[in-house]
Image (cartoon, rainbow, N blue to C red):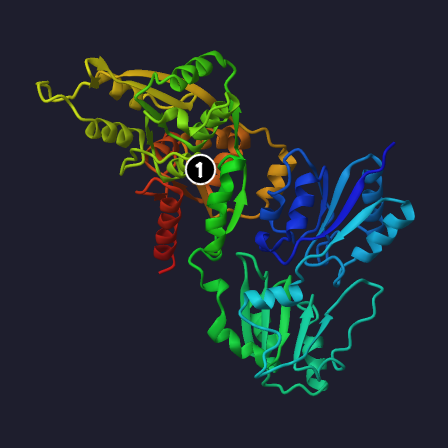
Amino acid sequence: MAKGFVWIVGAGPGDVRLLTLKAKEALEQAEVVVYDRLLTPSILSLVRPEAELIYAGKTPGGAKVSQDVINALLIAKAREGKKVVRLKNGDPFIFGRGAEEAEALVEAGIPFEIVPGLSSVFAVPAYAGIPLTDRRFASSFAVGVGHGAEEAKPVNFRQLASAETVVALMAVGELRRVVAELLEGGKDPETPAALIEWGATPRQRTLVAPLHRLPEMAQEVGMQPPAVLVVGEVVRLRERIAWFERKPLFGKRILVTRAEEQAEALASKLEDLGAEAIRLPLIRIVPTEDDAPLNAALERALNGGYDWIVFTSTHGVRTFFERVQRHGKDARAFASVRFAVIGPATGDALRQWGIQPDLMPTRYTNEGLAEAILANDQCPMTIENDQCPMANEGRAKRFLLWRAHGAREVLAQRLREAGALVDEVYAYRTVPNELPDEYLAAVLKEPIHIVTFTSPSAVNAFFAVLGEGRARHLLATAAIACIGPVTEQAVRQRGFEPSVVSEVHTINGLVEAMVRWAQVKTR
């Protein structure tokens, strides 16, 4: 049987966007992912849903998966011919057992690669606004662990006390000993110290205190692992340059329920604002089963048979012009046609094919698009009618609506009522994604603060994929954010009240509405 392959991957300290490009590529290829306890769910949401997820975490003071078992698991899965990712927090070679796992793979003859990750040694302090070195305060730093493997020799922090900056990982349980040894080694009791809990995640919390008082204060506020300890004058800089905890959506874990190919645009904006975006692809975009109406409409379009072509989604634009390309044509075939789009994202998608939209409404809805088309078109002055008939040189104007199956009929209906001839064809449909229960459990492991919906189909898929019980429990404990009134209505029909409804029906509008809501909640 063919051997598989193993990547030993450093996942970084928490923020999904601190993954390296190589780490992301490995996760996208993985058929099996063996992951640690401290991994943030947003990282697992990058894994293919059909991949096997195996938890190998070690809870402090609780159940542990032995290293021998983990080594044997990696070898066994690779011998099945699988592509395996061993996903470890931080960097696999810094205070981890990546080297032991690599040695086991060598002995078993399994090919592997090490994918380094950003270590929490420096990444977590950076997220707390604390540089480890600064020319005014420190030109050196020393690093140790408060506790490690059972058989490992404890770090003597007396020997590290002479460093201008001292960093300790895994130190919460040993905080009193670590601080005592630093003081015995010569550290001034008033040296500023910081304990950073769950760094580079929405749960980040930073306690700053004089070194001698830190253990007592940490106990008072209930600081818990994982945490990074930083001791030195550089801690004073946090007061001025702390940045992560000041972001408007900091601390929020937000569920992004868009289709996989659409999710990144929303997720990246949320992460820019300090949130942790959990990508949960509830729906898939699939082609329609009957190509005949599409081919007939495309043939008519290529031969000048339409006055207007209307797109209400980026998928509509893409599927249309992909077919145009397969016919050996391009934008030049539509020199006499006018194009209407429902909103900015659809307009941008059209521009990518070399065509500037002729019309985009100020209200990004089907109703707004219909009103804009009717108001834009010039009517013969001799027509004595409040509703202008869609006439052009004695014939009705012809529209092509290239859209999703199940789309609302309001646009086609209003155009027909005005006298237009409308060909409505369905280029694709959205269907609920089939996500394994273990995948959902891993991605939804931590509490969700906000669930976002950008379409009624996403609302319906939420209940179909998660199941009625799990879906209702999640929505009962989280705020709900909708992109506009149509999606809002779909949520209300399920018996829930949205906390956020964007007035501007775009991704940017939704994000801005969530920021305003979060600011009000924190006052």
Looking at the picture, tell me which residue is in the foreground, 423 or 115: 423
Query: Can residue 234 be seen in the rendering of this structure?
Result: yes
Q: Which residue does the image show at 40% across and 23% down from the upper left?
A: 402
Q: Identify the residue at the far right of this view.
A: 107
Is residue 288 depicted above or below 351 in this figure? above
Looking at the picture, tell me which residue is in the foreground, 31 or 250: 31
Looking at the picture, tell me which residue is in the foreground, 354 or 166: 354
Q: Which residue does the image show at 46% across and 39% down from the upper left?
A: 475
Is residue 365 depicted above or below 400 in this figure? below
Q: x, y (%) of residue 214?
A: 60, 76
Quadrant where the C terminus lies?
bottom left
Q: x, y (%) of residue 115?
A: 73, 53
Is residue 404 depicted above or below 299 in this figure? below
Q: Which residue does the image show at 31% across and 33% down from the upper left?
A: 365
- Indicate the amino acid at tag 1: Gln
Q: How many marks?
A: 1
Disc 1 residue crowd, few under 14, some 14–19, many 20+, Cα 10 Å? few
Looking at the picture, tell me which residue is in the foreground, 497 or 109: 109
Query: Which residue has dot 1 on it?
Result: 352
Q: Where, by quadrant of the figure, is residue 247 drawn?
A: bottom left
Element on which disc 1 rests:
loop
Is residue 287 depicted above or below 449 in this figure? above
Quadrant where the N terminus lies?
top right
Q: x, y (%) of residue 510?
A: 38, 45
Query: Can residue 223 be seen in the rendering of this structure?
Result: no
Q: Where, by quadrant of the figure, is residue 29 drawn?
A: top right
Q: Where, by quadrant of the figure, is residue 186 drawn?
A: bottom right
Q: x, y (%) of residue 478?
A: 45, 45
- Horizontal relation, residue 89 to residue 101: left or right: left
